[in-house]
Image (cartoon, rainbow, N blue to C red):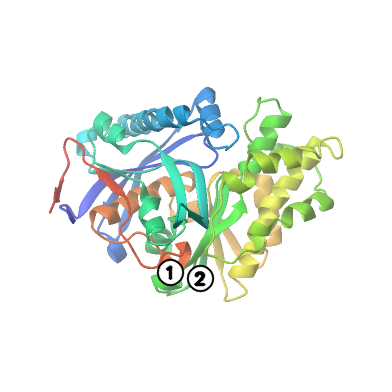
Amino acid sequence: MTVAHLDKTSHAIGLMSGTSADGIDAALVQITGSGAETRVDLMEFDFVPFPSDLRDTILRSSEISTARVDEICRLDVILGEWFAKAALVLCVKAGEKPEMIDFIGSHGQTIHHLPELTTVHEFSTRSSLQLGDPSVIAERTGITTISDFRARDLAAGGQGAPLVPIVDYLLYASAELSRVLLNIGGIANLTHVPAGCALEEVIAFDTGPGNMLLDALVMEITNGALSFDRDGEIASRGTESAELLNILMANPYLTLEPPKSTGREMFGHKAISEILTWRGKISDEDLVATLTSFTVESIADAIDRHVTSRETAEEILVSGGGAKNPSLMRLLETRLKKHRIRDLEALGMLSEAKEAVAFAVLANETVSGKPGNVPGATGATHPVVLGVIAPGAGARFSVD
């Protein structure tokens, strides 16, 4: 079965909720062409926060010790409703009627990611679970919805992540500059796009924690009054503990060779519980400063190991919530002073919109019948078309 993309130019919505589970990034874009001809214009962006009780349910459902099958079952539908709401709110903000949107690309909400090959019931498998029922999104909005992007790459032997590298390549490759696209969300990830490279030469992987541990620590030490270290203010009052930083940097994930991906399973509840045992040994401000340094050092170490050990990288383009943390960015600029570090907005892309835009572009590749994975980044045996399509009431695609 192939899906024919009827229009060369599409209006599409990308929806993304990351490992921080704080809400939904929604981007409305105009996409012209596909594959190497892809051109994207961001028309509108919005962030729809989750209520605190919903976020608590997501986080509870992401931990083996607290997850319940009945909550997960209901959460899939509830999150579908929330993703649909985010798309419709974005349409209102943009002054765009839903029937004028060609398709939605929804990443969903990851609640568990198991990228390591494991033999279960006679089959060797990798798996990853994203919630946010696309049928609910399509039914509520009337817009064709593409989701479940990770599953086909997993079936082809990959880790189902990272998925953004092909978008980084299509939108930010340069004939003259070797670039690192660094996104600091809950988890930090990077894509290295060498100057003038082919897609097969792209390197991409999760480096380790981005804001996930920092946010969890700040919530704990403020008794929930703050959900993140706004402007890096708490970290700026502290001093890193070299002893704790060395312990954190000994995490075995950091020395794994790509392809590799990670999430809350490695840097979630268990990790923050161990870090909290240091309360009283050092101040809360020093703890926040140390975790900020951990994020920076794990990113810098990954670039040293897997990028600059092979070739140069003239500039690093930073996106995600971490790009808005001055304390973190100052440390990153000091640690990677040989590189030019810029916010992705220097290239005209709203930093916080990057990953939502990426899933609109991935959906565009899907409806164009083109592969969306980068086997060298995910470990898949071959390129595959990603995603499952839930047709909307006014679908503008033919299915042959």
Q: Residues within 10 Å of mark 2 (few under 14, many from 20)?
A: some
Above or below: residue 83 compared with residue 255: above
Q: Secondary structure at mark 2?
A: loop
Which of these two is toward me, 333 or 86? 86
How far apart marks 1 and 2 lie (CA) works out to 7 Å
Q: Which mark is residue 6?
A: none
Q: Residue at x 85, y 35 (%)?
A: 280
**Position of the C terminus by quadrant:** bottom left
Q: Secondary structure at mark 1?
A: loop
At x 49% / y 48%, what residue is drawn?
351
391 and 25: which is toward the camera: 391
Q: Is residue 231 visible?
A: no
Read off the residue under disc 2: 178
How far across and how far down the image is residue 141, in percent? 26, 32
Residue at image position (71%, 59%) is: 334
Is 219 positioned to the left or the right of 161 in the image? right
Q: Amino acid at mark 1?
A: Ser
Residue that badge 1 annotates: 174
